[in-house]
Structure formats: structure tokens, C-alpha cells
Image (tube, rainbow, N blue to C red):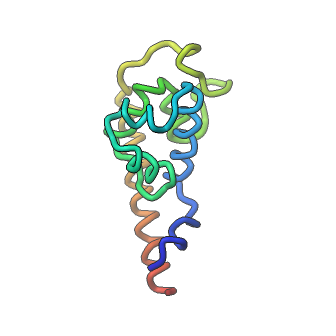
Amino acid sequence: MSTKKLENISTPHIAIAKRIRKAIKNCGLTESDFAKKIKIHKSSLSKYLAGHHAFSYEMLQRVLKYTDCDASWLLTGKLAQPGEPKTKKQQKPKNTMTESQKNQLIETQGKLIKSLEARIKDLERNS
């Protein structure tokens, strides 16, 4: 199966990756600096941001910790309250996710994985 076919898959984890890229930019960090902060290789971060890998719960916690963006916005693209995503300077510090946010993240990850697996199977059948 060709990698090019996978690049065209539009799944929720790609949307999350785009929001993470925006959050990194809003923090004024390079992707390389951000990768160091969340303790992964730059090449791994690039694969996440390109949508080749879905972010794990642990990885999303690290992203939330260092970007301090709204978890609702990061997962869904919608804020719990009206307005734009807040940068670290504008938002009150958050150290952890709420139980509701954790549950939402786990549910979203499960849906992402199932969606991607189904799409891969479709691509394999059609190739």
C-alpha cells in the first residue's frame, strides 16, 4: 500500500494535528524546540503533525502541558467558551486534564483508531 494514499485520509487525528501545529506556533516555539520540550525526536513530532500517527493520551497531555491550550479546542476545534484559542500568556495555567476531558480524549482516540483502521482496510481492498 502506498504512503501517498494514506496522506489523503481526512480523519479527526489530522484535524487534531493541525490544531497542535497552530498551538505550537502560538507559543512561539519551533517544532524542533517543542519536540525537545515534550521529550520526543523532531522526526517523531513531524510524523504526528503530518497525521501519520494519532496522538496518544500521554502525548496529548504533554501537548496540553506545554501549549496550555484549551483541551476542548484541541480535541474538537471548539472552545468550551466563546472566543479564540488562548495562548499561554492569555490563559490561566492548567496542570492537568479533568476526568471529563480524559474520558473525551479516550473516546476520541478510540474513534480515530477505528476510523483509520477501516480506511486502511478500504484502501488495501481497492489497491
Q: Nearer the viewer, residue 83 or 42?
A: 42
**x and y, in percent, of residue 3 in the image:** 48, 71
| Quadrant occupied by the N terminus | bottom left
Which residue appears at 57% of the width and 28% of the height? 80
Number of numbered labels in the structure image:
0
Which residue appears at 49% of the width and 48% of the height? 49
**x and y, in percent, of residue 101 in the image:** 41, 33
**x and y, in percent, of residue 56 in the image:** 35, 46
Q: Which of 78 and 34 is in front in this view?
A: 34
| Rendered position, 33 above or below 50 | above
Question: Which picture quadrant has residue 73?
Answer: top right
| Rendered position, 90 above or below 53 | above
Question: Which picture quadrant has residue 95?
Answer: top left
Q: Nearer the viewer, residue 24 or 14?
A: 24
Which residue appears at 40% of the width and 68% of the height? 117
Question: Which picture quadrant has residue 10?
Answer: bottom right
Residue placed farthest to the right in the image?
A: 83
**x and y, in percent, of residue 38 in the image:** 36, 33
